[in-house]
Image (spheres, helix red, strand yellow):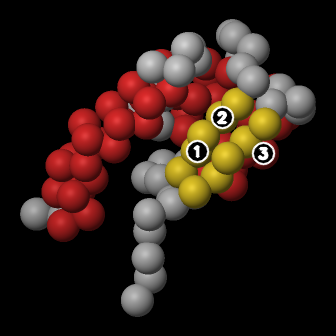
């Protein structure tokens, strides 16, 4: 078993609901995407004020997603972060 896949699957419900409910509790409308590809597709069909994106993702990495989102919505504000640590 891939240890990264294990921890990723274990943390998604906790981290995903934590930030999601923290924002929705404050009145923000949150549109989650499970991948960079899905996020880019959603940005093609709706206007967003803010994107929170992981830098290290399977498939498209966060920097690629950032470039694609900015080409569709140049005025969107973006917060990039990661929990990835390279030892």
Could you say which is closer to the camera, residue 19 or residue 33? 19
Q: CA distance from mark 2 to mark 1?
A: 6 Å
Circle 3 or circle 1, nearest the eye: 1
Q: Which residue is mark 3?
A: 67
Q: Residue at x 26, y 63 (%)?
A: 4
State left or right for residue 54 relative to residue 46: left
Give coordinates of residue 39: x percent, y percent.
58, 29
Residue occupying the point 53% across, 51% down: 54
Q: Quadrant of the C terminus?
A: bottom left
Which residue position holds label 1? Answer: 53
Element marked by disc 1: strand
Q: Nearer the viewer, mark 3 or mark 2?
A: 2
Give SS at disc 2.
strand
State how far apart marks 3 and 2 are (Cα). 12 Å
Residue 28 sits above or below residue 81 on the image: above
Q: Nearer the viewer, residue 71 or 15?
A: 15
Q: Are marks 2 and 1 in contact (CB under 8 Å)?
A: yes
Answer whether labels 3 and 1 touch (C-beta < 8 Å): no
Residue 51, numbered label: 2
Of mark 3 and mark 2, the one earlier in the sequence is 2
Question: Horizontal and vertical percent for residue 28?
Answer: 58, 17
Query: What residue do we see at 44% from left, 82% from top?
Result: 86
- Number of marks drawn: 3
Tell me if I can see residue 35 in this picture.
Answer: yes
Q: Residue shown at 66%/34% (left/top)?
A: 51
Image check: 79 left or right of 36? right
The secondary structure type at the circle numbered 3 is helix
């Amino acid at each position: 078993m891939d240890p990264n896949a294990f921890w990723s699957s274990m943390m998604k419900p906790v981290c995903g609901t934590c930030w999601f409910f923290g924002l929705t509790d404050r009145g923000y409308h949150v549109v989650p995407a499970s991948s960079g590809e899905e996020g880019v597709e959603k940005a093609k069909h709706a206007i967003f004020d803010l994107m929170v994106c992981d830098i290290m993702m399977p498939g498209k990495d966060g920097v690629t997603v950032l470039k694609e989102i900015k080409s569709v919505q140049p005025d969107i504000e973006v917060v990039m972060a990661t929990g990835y640590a390279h030892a």
